[in-house]
Image (cartoon, grey):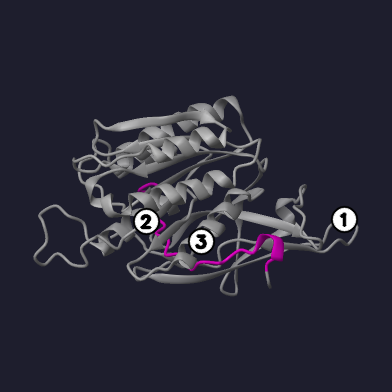
Amino acid sequence: MKPPAALLLIILSALISINAQDGKKTLNTFDVETNLLVFDDKEGYVSGVKQSDIKVFEGDVEQKLTSFKQLEQAFDVVIVADNTGSVRSQLDDIANIGKIIVANLRAEDNAQLIRFVGREQVEILQAWTNKKADLYEGLDNMYVEAGPSAVLDALYLASEDLIKRSAQTPNRRFAVVLISDGEDRNSYYAEKDLFKLLDNSPAQIFTITLTKELPKSWWGQVPNRKTVGTVVKFVNKIAAVTGGTSFILREKSTKDDVYNSLRALLIELRSQYVIKYISTNVTKDNNVRKLTVTVADGPNGEKRKAYFKDTIVIIPPK
């Protein structure tokens, strides 16, 4: 089904790692959380959709929804920008990606800008605001510093602040957008700390990962550097466990690839609904799953269309 022209969603087959959240779960059940958009036949947002109106399929197998929540379209987003030496040649790209996100904010949206290097260099460049000029200025004021990168620390501190904010203004969408090469080398916090913090919170993490300067393999590289493959697994896991999406920009990615990734991100941030289900029949091998969703007609027979991610890859824990 073709998305509406006014909000053309480029569906990315992003690799998503879904991990069990506790030791009681077996290898054949995994929680999946994703965003859902519903439009009418005039390309307008539809509110009032019920859980019973939605059906989700992995391949041809219907999945049982465990949670269905409608949110306001307004959102609060923390833009977390990598300013380490490893992204020196890409700092302008990071700033421009941030500016595109800011340019698409509406009056009811708010954003905060954080830059980071090492664990002692996580800095709020612009506090919460809906003033685009202030956010643009913050992005222009970013600068590179030496030091081993602390991606997890930056995400933890950004998420912690966002969770406090969500307690004051519920039912909005809350998101962290990480713009980075994704190479964590010196964080105090571990993945498990971040996931524990975000457990049952409304905050989702989206990652835009610039990999062109990362080593392709371990051979002949500086000690403690992360390869492209390692980083991709890392950011995919973070996005998936928190219900966000991972967008990977590679060495040969074009400007159109960047634009399409950002367009998909912004449409996810506009999603009215968050759904959860338990994926079943997961084996020890990688599982590429094609997702489809259907939505029932409205109470008066109005036609409705639903969009969300079309593919996930489930990677069970070892």
Instruction: Say which quadrant the N terminus sits in.
Output: bottom right
Is 59 in front, or is 203?
A: 203
Q: Which residue is mark 2?
A: 209
The amino acid beneath tag 2 is: Thr
Q: Which residues are magenta?
A: 3-24
Residues at discs 1 and 2 in contact (Cβ within 8 Å): no
User: Label 1 belongs to which residue?
Assistant: 299
Q: Residue at x 67, y 60 (%)?
A: 7
On the picture, is 148 further left or further right than 205?
left
Q: Quadrant of the C terminus?
A: bottom left
> Going 20% across and 41% down the picture, which residue do you hit?
186
Is residue 81 at least partly visible in the picture?
yes
Q: Quadrant of residue 196?
A: top left
Q: Residues within 10 Å of mark 2 (few under 14, many from 20)?
A: many
Distance between the Cα atoms at labels 3 and 1? 37 Å
**Mark 3 vs 1: CB contact within 8 A:** no
Relative height, residue 282 to residue 243 (above, below):
below
Q: Between 222 and 293, which is closer to the camera in this rendering?
A: 222
Location of mark 3 (residue): 259
- Residue type, label 3: Tyr
